Image (spheres, helix red, strand yellow):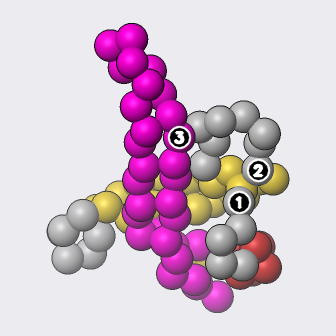
Amino acid sequence: MALDAGLKAESEVIEAGKPRKVSLEIKAVAVGEVARQLQALGVGGQAVFRGFLTHQRNGRGFIAHVTVIEPAAAEPGSF
């Protein structure tokens, strides 16, 4: 089983001494048991995702391959 998804990260960081809100959305894919875990998490679910980035097959943009899903941390900046 393979599952296509989108991941979104939002946080606030300090840059040049001033707070800045940052966000990122990226296409993602999960395979096998990790895909089942991602599907069970549901839309809008929060977790820490680990894996690797690679080019999309068409060479335009990146895709995150999720290999591990962990419960969301209470720390800001986790995604």
Give amino acid for label 1.
Gln
- Residue found 60% across the figure and 49% down from its top: 79
Compared to residue 59, the image places residue 42 above or below, namely below
- Whether residue 21 sits left or right of residue 11 in the image: it is left
- Residue found 51% across the figure and 48% down from its top: 10
Mark 3 or mark 2, whichever is nearer to me: 3
Q: Which residue is mark 1?
A: 46
- Whether residue 26 sits left or right of residue 68 in the image: it is left
> How far is mark 3 from mark 2, CA to CA?
14 Å
Q: Which residue is mark 2?
A: 72
- Residue found 65% across the figure and 78% down from its top: 43
The magenta segment is 1-30
Q: Which residue is mark 3?
A: 11
**Residues at discs 3 and 1 in contact (Cβ within 8 Å):** no
Residue pushed farthest left? 59
Measured from the top left, where is residue 15 in percent x and y? 36, 20
- Whether residue 41 sits left or right of residue 52 in the image: it is right
Q: Nearer the viewer, residue 23 or 3?
A: 23
**Residues at discs 1 and 2 in contact (Cβ within 8 Å):** yes
Mark 2: give few (<14), some (14-19) or many (20+) Cα within 10 Å: few
Measured from the top left, where is residue 39 in percent x and y? 71, 81
